[in-house]
Amino acid sequence: MQTSKDYLHVFLDMGDALLNSGAEIFRVEDTLNRMGYACGATHMNVFVITSSIVITMEFPGDGARTQTRRIHECGGNDFTKLEQLNDLSRRFCSHPVSAAELRNEFEKINANRPKPLWKLLGSVLAACSFALFYGGTIPDAITAGIAAILIWSLQKYLRPVCMNEVTFQFAASFLTGCAICGFTLLCPFLHMDKIMIGDIMLLIPGLMSTNAIRDVLIGDTLSGIIRLIAALLLAAALALGFMGAIILLGGLDFDHNDGYTADYRSYRICGFWSSFSHETKYLPLAAAGGFLSWLVFLFGKSLWGSVFLPALLAGFIADVYAEILARICKETSTSFFVTSVIPLIPGSTLYYCMSSIVEGNPMQALNYGRDTFLFAFGIAAGMSIAWAICYFLRSVKAR
């Protein structure tokens, strides 16, 4: 006869893996609750924040058992693993198996690691695409791609020896900023701001800040606050690193624009880059999501002129799109949503906020900082509204 003790360890491992693959807090709690009841528990209580998981299970005649897991790393984006874990949980809920069999299936999935060369290719493509996306030239895109190789190397070799993620963020942004400034000084025809924006998108905690606001809006207040503080620290380290490089080399001019006036040809670039977070069979769907979100944002921008309402509308449409695909493909909505909103992540406004500080223009820095916040808040609000509507419809259907 299976007991709660048999399942607790594997459930904690699955929760840890889900968090590190990019799953939301509510998704981890819901998944573990469903799996617990599916295997025969009469009572399940799951509490998850970004740094720990607490599970209480009670089986008939066995009493309640509670175990806690400290999460040392959280916030990855391995959507292939996330989809595999989601599929495993669905299969387990439909046809429960023993804890040993579940452990065996989990270990097979957890042993898979992203191929380093694929990540390198994705980083280079991302940096090149965003340099073009924000108005850069072909030489700017090539330079951004070269800098992306440096970032990939730092992530692979420097990150493991850094004290924490904030330290790595500062070191990586400073070294990358120095390299980009050096390229710009050697080749005056390059546009430093376009190159830096392309590479900032590889490091900016835009998704973390958006998820933090979303967590607060849907009721996971503690997790949201923790994530928001972490995102602010990482963003500050990123800004300080690039600012340090700019100040060190000095004498460089900035070509300011509003940060979201990419020409229409950029749609296909944006969608193509977005697709690299998915399995091959979902590439067209992920690309379409990136295309759709930016199209909706520009449409809203033409109507309202501000940043918040267009970002809210784009976030809403992106989440509805992701929820529909999740039902059709039997996958998580997270992976589809994240790739759909990548074009909206405010990397350019963060960069221009940073450069305005370096130039000694506090009012302009304040305006760009405001836009950065409104972008993140708008995306999170739109996503939360869509999620609340979908949750309501699922609840009505279940009754």
Image: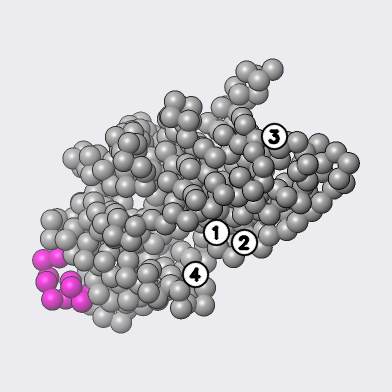
| Between discs 4 and 1, the one toward the N terminus | 1
Mark 2 residue crowding within 10 angstroms, few (<14) / some (14–19) / many (20+): some
User: At which x and y percent is residue 138?
Assistant: 13, 56
Residue designated by label 2 = 71
**Residue positioned 66% across, 20% down in the render:** 398
Q: Mark 3 and mark 1: span between their CA atoms?
A: 27 Å
Single out the mark in the foreground, 3 or 2. 3
Callout 4 secondary element: helix
**Which residue matches tag 4?**
165
Q: Earlier in the sequence, mark 3 or mark 1?
A: 3
For label 1, the residue is 74
Main secondary structure along the magenta-highlighted residues: helix
Q: Quadrant of the C terminus?
A: top right
Closer to us: mark 4 or mark 1?
A: 1
Instruction: Please tell me which of labels 3 and 2 falls first in the chain.
Output: 3
Q: Position of residue 331 (x, y in %)?
A: 47, 35
Q: Indicate the quadrant where residue 181 lies.
A: bottom left
Along the line of sight, the residue nearer the viewer: 151 or 33: 33
Residue type (three-letter) at the residue carrying disc 2: Ile
Magenta span has 188?
yes
* Amino acid type at image mark 3: Ala
Outermost residue to the bottom: 248
> How far separated are the C-alphas under marks 3 and 4?
37 Å
Q: Where does the image place residue 141, in percent across and percent down from the top left?
A: 18, 58
User: Which stretch did the figure color magenta?
Assistant: 181-193
From what the image shows, is residue 212 above or below residue 139? Answer: above
| Coloration of the structure image | one colour
Query: Tag 4: residue type?
Result: Glu
> Height in image: 290 above or below 107?
above
Mark 1 Cα shell of 10 Å, populated few (<14), some (14-19), many (≥20): some
The reply to whether discs 3 and 2 touch (Cβ–Cβ < 8 Å) is no
Residue of label 3? 38
